[in-house]
Amino acid sequence: MTADVMALLRTELRVERRTGGTLLVLAPYAVAALALVAITTGADLPLLRRLSPGLLWAVVVVLGVLTTMRQGYAEDPTRRDLLHLLGMRPEAVWIARVLAAATLVAALEVVLTVAAVVLLDLAVGDPLLHAAAVPVTALGLAALGVLARDLADGARSGVALVPLVVVPLAVPLALAPVQARAVAEAGGSGWTWIALAALVTTVTVGVGIAAAANLQEVAS
Amino acid sequence: MAQLSSPTTDAMRRAVGPVVRADDVSLVRGGVWVLDGVTVRLDAGQVALCRGPNGAGKTSLLRVLAGLVRPTAGSVTLAVRQVDLVGHEPALHPDLTLAENLQVVAALTGRDHRDVDAALTHVGLGGAGGRRAARCSTGMRRRAEFARLRLTRPCLLLLDEPAVALDGDARVLVQDAITATVRRGGSVVVATHAPGPLADLATARWTVRDGSVTT
């Protein structure tokens, strides 16, 4: 199963390298959004510093979930049918899709962190805390987006269902790194918040894996 | 064209057992009975020609037989693991080259890039492997689907209107794929409006109408 996951993950990243849908299209928009905030606050640096962590993670959440809406290899029902016929289990397909999206979201988070430091004078705080928040939230947002997309594909209500699934679970993923940084700055341990994000991520990934076979059939 | 069976070999194949069997299968999609009490059996080496009007349920039947869709009622028994379906839409990512698309299949079936090159050459796409699928004609994409069969080597091959978008020369690929599958001891179901020369290869005929199948 691991070899199958890696084979599909390589393919998904090859598609992204070819199309540049995330890093060449979404990332510049995200940086532009941060720049716009910097421009509108003018020279009010203290305000910018206070806002920057929340702005960074708000943009990450919005664009992170959008990343999972790209046209990857396994997003098309015909190609997903082929993967099934080739003996690839739905769980393996789901994991590969999430890992591919998580890689892109993590790259987006790194780009946006650099942009926020430059444009919004963001103080990263404890670098270890931030470094831990990046993969945890990237995986959580990726899993959430892929799960929401599968539900939308299978539901008669279509994409209208997506916000109902995404928003409640995205909130802790966006809140955790911001709160972790704030708590750490106040002298406490921010790791509790990272643990919360990890818990949400674990539950989302678990639900996705457990439901992968049914979701695939409903979507086909 | 010679038939791929005789009364003697047919008897032998039935003794081996069915490659796929559907028992009283029904399928409901969106409140509509797409398949209704379908019972079919395909033995090793058999080629079934599946005919019927648009919307009769041919594609749904193939998808159920492939194990891609779980029937609402009844059961499907597959005796083989290597199943491939060539459907209406090619299973190619438009931003990947033809070779890259086949490399995905090769990676999942334990083959390598030489097999991909050989498969593309076999279907007349030897010089087009580096071309993105989006920039290929419909016929070229269809050929690439048949190149895939050289990698998957299915024991149950399901073809849904296989000759669509193929020119006269390329239609031989359909016959080749059927013959190769049968020689491996596999079985084939061909759903088509216009069987043409494929009718000569058929050892069984199924007629689909309003979700029911008569054999």
Image (cartoon, helix red, strand yellow):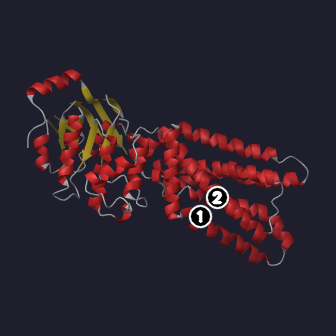
Q: Amino acid at mark 1?
A: Leu
Vertical order, B113 against B184 (above or below): below
The crowd level at tag 2 (other Cα within 10 Å; few <14, some 14-19, many 20+) is some
A162 relative to A32 in the view: left or right: left
Q: Residue furthest front?
A: B114
Q: Split into 4 quadrants, where in the image is the N terminus of chain B?
A: top left
The crowd level at tag 1 (other Cα within 10 Å; few <14, some 14-19, many 20+) is some
Vertical order, A204 against B170 (above or below): above
Q: Amino acid at mark 2?
A: Ala
> Regarding mark 1 in the picture, which secondary structure is present there?
helix
Relative image position of residue B16 (x, y in whole percent):
22, 22
Which quadrant of the structure image shows residue B187?
Answer: top left
Relative image position of residue B99 (x, y in whole percent):
38, 55
Q: Residue at x 72, y 49 (%)?
A: A172
Query: Which chain is home to disc 2?
Result: A
Query: Which chain is home to disc 1?
Result: A
Q: Which mark is residue B144?
A: none
Closer to the chain start, of discs 1 and 2, is 1
| Residue marked by disc 1 | A23
Image marks 1 and 2: residues in contact by CB distance under 8 Å: yes
Q: Which mark is residue A107?
A: 2
